[in-house]
Image (tube, rainbow, N blue to C red):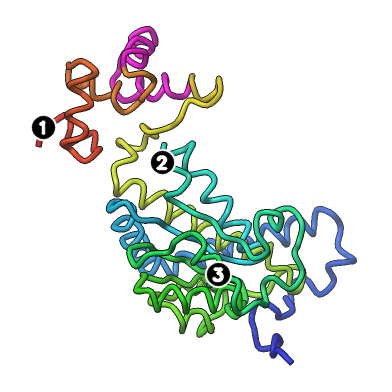
């Protein structure tokens, strides 16, 4: 029998023992107060998060991948973060990959038993052609999910950099990985419901890893999403706004530059700031490794 009682994520929260007798406002206040602990828990593991970012940026910059794998809520959070990278940063969907125990259908409907498989994680990594250049991040609130544990074990045997994110210290997955990130936000408001604080904690860390890694590989200029994809009307206007913010130009000038740059925001920005045409801007960006500041300065 699993010794779940020893896990902080399974412990009862003394502040919410009377949850079922609280008023609606009291429940909301209790949850809000506990959510603050998620932010503090992440603050305590920032050096480890920074290390994961460095590994991810190095891999992505070299054309390799950042791969998340998890089950249940943890798996869904990984899939979500991966899915949001292409529209935000203009990268291929193959650059950041989210694997969830039970496959894509498990994102919506739980696939019973998938997380307990000792072979499924390895099989899925093999199926996507895992290489030693990739970085694999295992997500599990409890820190003991077999799907993640054995997946990380296989990834490490392939020579990958491996990261474990768990919400219990000294976790099994943490011992299996090259780097353990173990924030502990404490017992949940609703005992054992790790979609709450544990899920929030993991989401915060994934936000940091993917966003900071993309900053490191040149997908951001100042704090602007200069590789955003114009896939709908809102994003088309956002692209114009980004060009205007970055260069101080008028909307009509932004639209003209984006048209000449075939919609590529980063090229339009370099055109206007560097006073060059689209072809020259593309060359400058290529020579600068996609970094807007370097493309403008020529260094």
- Residue in the picture at 67% in, 77% down: 116
Horizontal side, residue 298 vs residue 203: left or right = left
Residue that extends furthest to the right in the rendered view of this protein: 21
Q: Quadrant of the C terminus?
A: top left
Query: Which is more foreground, mark 3 or mark 2?
Result: 3
Task: Tell me the element at label 2.
Answer: loop
The stretch drawn in magenta includes residue 10: no
- Residue in the picture at 47% in, 66% down: 137
Query: Which is more foreground, mark 2 or mark 1?
Result: 2
Horizontal side, residue 64 vs residue 284: left or right = right
Residue 5 at x, y percent in the picture: 71, 87
Q: Which residue is mark 1?
A: 298
Q: CA distance from mark 3 to mark 2?
A: 25 Å
- In the foreground, 70 or 205: 70
Segment tinted magenta in the rendering: 237-260
- In the foreground, 21 or 172: 172
Horizontal side, residue 215 vs residue 19: left or right = left
Query: Which is more foreground, mark 1 or mark 3?
Result: 3
Q: Which residue is mark 3?
A: 123
Residue 223 at x, y percent in the picture: 36, 37
Q: Which residue is mark 2?
A: 91
């Amino acid at each position: 029998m699993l010794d779940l009682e020893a896990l902080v994520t399974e412990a009862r929260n003394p502040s919410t023992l009377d949850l079922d007798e609280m008023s609606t406002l009291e429940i909301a206040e209790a949850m809000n107060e506990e959510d603050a602990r998620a932010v503090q828990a992440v603050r305590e593991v920032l050096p480890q998060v920074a290390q994961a970012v460095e590994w991810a940026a190095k891999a992505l910059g070299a054309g390799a991948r950042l791969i998340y794998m998890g089950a249940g809520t943890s798996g869904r959070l990984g899939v979500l973060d991966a899915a949001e990278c292409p529209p935000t940063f203009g990268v291929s969907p193959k650059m950041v990959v989210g694997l969830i125990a039970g496959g894509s259908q498990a994102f919506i409907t739980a696939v019973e038993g998938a997380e307990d498989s000792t072979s499924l994680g390895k099989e899925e990594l093999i199926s996507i052609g895992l290489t030693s250049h990739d970085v694999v991040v295992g997500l599990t609130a409890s820190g003991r999910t077999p799907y993640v544990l054995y997946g990380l074990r296989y990834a490490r045997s392939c020579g990958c950099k491996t990261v474990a994110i768990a919400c219990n210290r000294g976790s099994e997955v943490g011992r299996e990985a090259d780097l353990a990130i173990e924030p502990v936000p404490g017992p949940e408001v609703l005992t054992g419901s790790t979609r709450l604080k544990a899920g929030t904690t993991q989401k915060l860390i994934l936000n940091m890893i993917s966003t900071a890694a993309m900053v490191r590989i040149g997908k951001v200029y100042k704090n602007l999403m200069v590789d955003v994809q114009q896939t709908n009307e809102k994003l088309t206007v956002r692209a114009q706004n980004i060009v205007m913010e970055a260069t101080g130009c008028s909307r009509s000038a932004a639209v003209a530059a984006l048209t000449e740059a075939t919609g590529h925001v980063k090229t339009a920005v370099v055109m206007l700031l560097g006073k060059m045409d689209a072809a020259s801007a593309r060359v400058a960006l290529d020579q600068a490794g996609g970094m807007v500041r370097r493309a403008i300065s020529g260094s």
